[in-house]
Image (tube, rainbow, N blue to C red):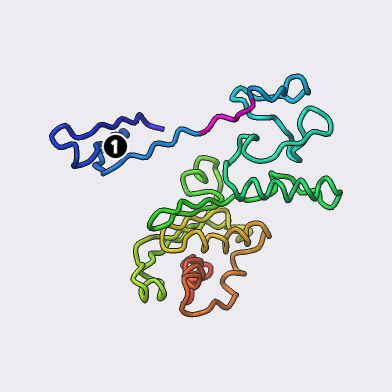
Amino acid sequence: MPPFNFEPRKQDIAAGVNCTTGEPEVLGSHVLLAVGRRPNTDDLGCEKAGIALDAKGFIEADDQYQTRAKGVYAVGDVLGGPQFTHTSWDDHRLLFDILLGRGKRSRRDRFIPYTAFTDPQVAGVGLNEKEARARGVSYEAASMSFGGVARAIEVDETAGQMKVLVDPKTERVIGATIAGAEAGELIHVFVTAMQAGASARAIVDAEFVHPTFAEGVQSLVMRLERFALH
């Protein structure tokens, strides 16, 4: 992350805040700075129970939530992964099945979506283009403005963009990012396809209700040359 500095405008405190991140300065009305959270494990007596902590105080556990102490499991924020309520709930579901011997799926065998409930919402799952390039992952990408979605036009919510990345060989979705109205709802179309290991063609072949925001997800995927109508 580039250096980040901010200070109130000296000439007019009420006017806003100057932010410098190595790029041209950005003027805003407020600054929200997220520094993360520290796990409350200092006085749990983990060392006496043989439960290992990492350098930041998070509990160490394997892919099936087993700590170093036999028969002791850990789930949720204390593991140090994405600290979302929905991730903790999914941890519980997975461990429940593991303990009952009903499943072998681990916490690594899933795709974790996120949503920032701003206006408009921002949501994503999997890799974005920058991450894919950094990892040397091949992909085909398509993007689309919310201005091309009939429902968005009808309800005057045309601000925003959608982007999807697809594996050229398998046609599986490897990532999607949505910034726009109901992004937190729409991202689940991609989450489900990715979890199922399904080809993006399943989205193309499905019949979507018109006019809905979800219809725009299908239109987005059909912006890929392999799925385009000519």
88 vs 138, nearest the viewer: 88
Per the rendered image, the range of residues in magenta is 37-41
Residue farthest to the left, as pictured: 11
Which amino acid, by three-letter code, is at mark 1? Answer: Glu
Q: Quadrant of the N terminus?
A: top left
Residue farthest to the front, as pictured: 43
3 vs 224, nearest the viewer: 3
Residue 99 is inside the magenta segment = no
Please tell me whether residue 139 is drawn above or below residue 13 in the rendered image: below
173 vs 182, nearest the viewer: 182
Residue 207 lies in quadrant: bottom right
> At 76% across and 36% down in the image, what residue appears?
73
Residue density around tag 1, few if under 14, some if 14–19, many if 20 or more, within 10 Å = few
Q: Position of residue 173 (x, y in %)?
A: 58, 58
Residue 8 lies in quadrant: top left
Residue tagged by mark 1? Answer: 23
Left-right relation of 46 to 111: right
Q: Position of residue 215 (x, y in %)?
A: 49, 73
Magenta residues, dominant SS class: loop
Residue farthest to the right, as pictured: 101
37 vs 6, nearest the viewer: 37
Q: Position of residue 21 (x, y in %)?
A: 32, 34
Please tell me whether residue 93 is drawn above or below residue 74 in the rendered image: below
Left-right relation of 75 to 134: right
SS for dot 1 = loop
> At 41% across and 74% down in the image, what residue appears?
151
